[in-house]
């Protein structure tokens, strides 16, 4: 019995086919080969085409199916993980009305700030666990204001994964977890927020049918199945944002457990059994994949927009065509601190943990007689690690004190240099696992379809690869972090 997981990322689509009995990955595919760009219509804006996502999902699935490494007729369930907080608007035919306004777009901040004050800060935080900020509900307000002709045609508002499920099945659904990341969910009443709908003037009919994360969100249509070489009727039995899904893939489901990722953006994600929130909304709280009214599981999320995107920018700018592995090797030969070079990685939109400010990326103390591309790469990776430490300190202020952080051995965690900087500056060991978002989505599909008895059954074959603990460099990294922090505060 096989499970198909789809991971709708910012830069590409990745799919994994997993053997449900053994947990082994029998096939993986990524599409397209080159990273997908972000449309920046104006500074601070960020859009992508939902139709292009769908074309790329199809390309990835076809690529996996035509690898001939498995029998596609044996796929029994499909799960979807997706980039969070995006806004997809569709008409009554299911056609996307405009490009999606994605997670790192900052145009809706004024709309969210006004809603926060109108609803009332305490009511907003205690019920939504967040300020509306620049999340999905506020992004829709921008469309309503700036593009009224588009807004008039809106039949349903969706998160990116909801849209892909719609294209696969023809059925529109969402979940409390998805609505909470869009700031549409009232945690006190455990239903769609009347405060948000009333303030923005939204009709409740624009919200798709709300179902549990682990449930049937439709079945693959005959037409789509024929196009992709799949069996018609396969249930889509799991949908979750990429960070809750990453936590699931690392079996981070219970209070006190913590996961991290360091892809285009960076995230630390901890689970709480309390309706916890940050008074300044520097970190955010969403319904975790296993949240229910009777069994509260809240994902406390720190997000750093400028993470792997800085590493990619440095490679493309100073070393085009050079592999990340080679750059990591070069940078590892430079001493910690990069000979006085510091980089602030905040160049990918407004940063929530910095009060939704557009700080930008900055290179400090560049010496043209000393510093090489190796110094730039090291300073970039150290700057990203320092940003994680800054955010983790905010989480600690809010009662999250991890003794270990679980992460997939992927993206920035493939770099020993970054991982060493991360554990030494945070003082927290990192446990690395051989998993990624598409594998987690596949396992989630197995849970949702009842193929696994429970979460523990789904993860019985997942074992850690290694544990990296802080070492002798802790004191040095603390000193460097304090210098970096002083530079950051100058820009706030």
Image: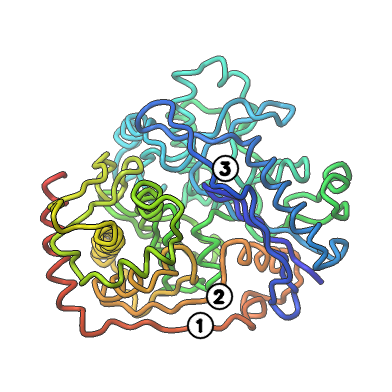
Closer to us: 294 or 175? 175
Label 3, label 2: how many angstroms apart (C-alpha)? 27 Å
Tag 1 residue: 465
Q: SS at mark 3?
A: loop
Q: CA distance from mark 3 to mark 1?
A: 33 Å
Image quarter of the N terminus: bottom right
Residue 168 shown left or right of residue 346 in the figure: right
Q: Which residue is mark 3?
A: 159
* Residue found farthest to the front: 369
Q: Residue at x 16, y 51 (%)?
A: 488
Residue 233 x/y as whole percent = 86, 53
Q: Nearer the viewer, residue 45 or 329?
A: 329
Disc 1 is placed on an element classified as loop
Q: Earlier in the sequence, mark 2 or mark 1?
A: 2
| Pointer 3 or 1: first along the chain | 3
In 3D space, how far apart are the residues under numbered discs 2 and 1 (Cα atoms)? 7 Å
Q: How many marks?
A: 3
């Amino acid at each position: 019995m096989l499970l198909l997981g789809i991971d709708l990322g910012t830069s590409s689509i990745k799919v994994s086919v997993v053997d449900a009995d053994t947990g082994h990955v029998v096939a993986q595919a990524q599409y397209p080969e080159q990273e997908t760009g972000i449309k920046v219509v104006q500074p601070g804006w960020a859009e992508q085409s939902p139709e292009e996502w769908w074309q790329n999902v199809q390309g990835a699935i076809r690529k996996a199916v035509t690898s001939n490494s498995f029998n596609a007729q044996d796929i029994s369930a499909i799960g979807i993980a997706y980039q969070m907080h995006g806004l997809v608007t569709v008409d009554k035919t299911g056609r996307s009305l405009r490009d999606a306004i994605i997670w790192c777009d900052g145009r809706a901040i004024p709309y969210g700030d006004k809603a926060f004050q109108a609803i009332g800060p305490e009511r907003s935080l205690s019920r939504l666990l967040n300020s509306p900020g620049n999340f999905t509900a506020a992004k829709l307000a921008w469309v309503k204001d700036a593009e009224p002709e588009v807004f008039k045609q809106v039949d349903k508002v969706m998160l990116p994964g909801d849209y892909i499920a719609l294209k696969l099945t023809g059925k529109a659904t969402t979940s409390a977890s998805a609505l909470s990341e869009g700031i549409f969910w009232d945690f006190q009443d455990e239903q769609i927020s009347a405060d948000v709908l009333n303030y923005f003037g939204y009709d409740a009919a624009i919200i798709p049918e709300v179902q549990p994360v682990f449930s049937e969100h439709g079945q693959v249509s005959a037409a789509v199945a024929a196009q992709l070489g799949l069996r018609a009727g396969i249930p889509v039995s799991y949908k979750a944002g990429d960070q809750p899904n990453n936590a699931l893939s690392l079996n981070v489901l219970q209070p006190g457990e913590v996961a991290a990722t360091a892809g285009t953006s960076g995230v630390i994600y901890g689970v709480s059994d309390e309706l916890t929130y940050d008074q300044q909304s520097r970190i955010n709280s969403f319904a975790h994949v296993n949240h229910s009214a009777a069994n509260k599981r809240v994902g406390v999320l720190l997000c750093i927009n400028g993470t792997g995107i800085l590493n990619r920018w440095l490679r493309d700018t100073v070393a085009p065509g050079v592999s990340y592995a080679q750059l990591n090797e070069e940078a590892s030969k430079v001493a910690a601190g990069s000979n006085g070079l510091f980089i602030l990685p905040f160049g990918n939109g407004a940063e929530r943990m910095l009060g939704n400010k557009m700080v930008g990326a900055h290179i400090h103390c560049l010496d043209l007689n000393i510093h090489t591309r190796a110094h730039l790469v090291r300073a970039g990776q150290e700057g990203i690690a320092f940003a994680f430490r800054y955010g983790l300190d905010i989480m600690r202020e809010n009662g999250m004190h991890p003794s270990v952080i679980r992460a997939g051995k992927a993206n920035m965690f493939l770099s020993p240099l970054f991982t060493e900087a991360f554990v030494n500056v945070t003082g927290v060991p990192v446990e690395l696992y051989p998993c990624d978002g598409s594998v987690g989505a596949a396992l989630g599909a197995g849970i949702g379809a009842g193929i696994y008895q429970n979460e523990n059954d789904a993860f019985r074959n997942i074992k850690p690869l290694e544990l990296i603990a802080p070492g002798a460099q802790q004191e040095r990294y603390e000193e460097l972090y304090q210098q970096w922090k002083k530079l950051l505060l100058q820009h706030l």
